Structure formats: structure tokens, C-alpha cells
Amino acid sequence: MDRRTKEDIKAGVYKQSLIVRHWSNKELRRLAPLFSGDVLNLSGWKDEDKQGGTYREYFKNAASYTISNCPGEDRSSDIDEAFHEKVSIDLMADIPDGLIAGFDVVFNHTVLEHIFDCFKAFANMCLLTRDVIISVVPFSQLQHDANVSYGDYWRFCPAAMRKLYSTNGLSIIYESAAPFKDAAIYLLFVGARHPAVWKTIFPDYKPLTNVGEWIGLRKRK
């Protein structure tokens, strides 16, 4: 019988999310300075990295940095507007003509699992970029929906991410997975419309294999 309380479960979700968030932040701190041009943090809430910083600080070579949220859910209002711009984008609606190909880099962190039509959402993400999409998604994570503001619908395999990128005209240039056995597993994917540009800038591309192979294994006595 599961004797965990709601508080225990909530604490477990937080612990899982915090460990892998720190992992994805480490990856992003290494990769983000490689990008310049116009950067969009898509559905970026308040841009917080949950370690006391903002993702704007990671993209230190960006010419501009924009945060989007769904209309009516602008959570970026408390951030100093001298360091970013704000825009409303609904990934379930048609992208306005003025925003199509409006950014060089579109960054989205744990967004897709909260959108039921993730195919349309990802296609819209790709419409927004002139070149690069950076996506962090959960491969394995406890359910964490909120009944009022958003649902929790999907978990993504590496093959699914590769297919989402390729069907929208982007090539994968980097992918990685969180390595922890006692936490959630995030995947980080980077794809580009112009992969040749990044060949000498990014680490050699190595596809992920057997992500989470320890899941379900019991410790031997």
C-alpha cells in the first residue's frame, strides 16, 4: 500500500525536477554563449533558471532577448525590462506574420509536455526561428499538471524529438540526456536549419542510445 501523503509526493516531484533542472542549466550555460542574434525564450514564464539566475544571463552574446508567454499568462512582468522584450504567443493559434522567422534562436524549456497538440506547437516553434531550436523535454518525470493553468500530457523519446525536428526542416546538431538514476530524466536537443554553420562550433553530434536503461531494475542483494 502506498502510504505517501500528498506532501511527500509534492516533495518528490520538486526534488526530481530540481536535480534535472540543474543538469539542463549546466548544459545551457555551456551551449548558450555559442549563439548570437535574436533569441526567444518561448513560454519562458519569468525567465528564472531556479538557481537564482535568469536564462537571459546564459545567452550573453544575444543581440536581443525576448520572453513570450501565452496571452493572459504574462509571468515576466517582474523582470527588468531593460534586459528583455516581451511578446504574447499562443502555440495553439496561427503565428502572426510579423513573428514568423522573427528570431535566430528559439529556446523552450519543458514546454511541449504541457500542450496536448504537441505537433502543432512544435511546428509553430519552428515557424518562429530563422535557424535554431533548443528544446528541453522530459523523457521520464512524475506527473505535474495543474488543473487550472496547464495540463501534463506527454513524455518524449529521442526518436520522437528527432522526428519533430526533421519533419519541420531542421537537422539535429546536439542531443543529451540527464544521467541520474534517482531523478527525472530530461532530454536536451538542438536543431538547426543550417547545420553546416555549426559543424565547427558545436561538439561532434552523438545520438543518444538507451536513455533511462536503469528504469525498472531492482538492486541485487
Image (cartoon, rainbow, N blue to C red):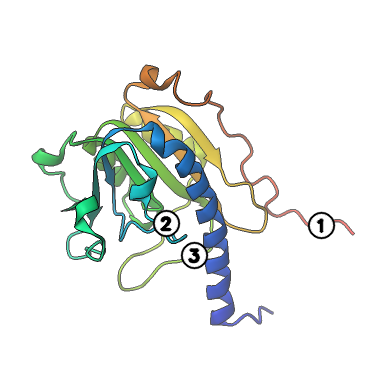
Q: Amino acid at mark 3?
A: Gln
Q: Residue at x 20, y 56 (%)?
A: 81
Q: Amino acid at mark 1?
A: Lys
Circle 1 crowding by C-alpha within 10 Å: few under 14, some 14–19, many from 20: few
* Helix, strand or loop at mark 3: loop
Residue 69 position in % (x across, y down): 24, 57
* Helix, strand or loop at mark 2: loop
Which image quarter holds the C terminus?
Answer: bottom right
| Residue closest to the eye, 172 or 47 | 47
Residue at the spot of label 2: 49
Circle 2 crowding by C-alpha within 10 Å: few under 14, some 14–19, many from 20: some
Residue at the spot of label 3: 143
Q: Residue at x 35, y 42 (%)?
A: 59
Mark before the other along the chain sequence, 2 or 3: 2
Q: Is residue 59 visible?
A: yes
Q: Amino acid at mark 2?
A: Asp
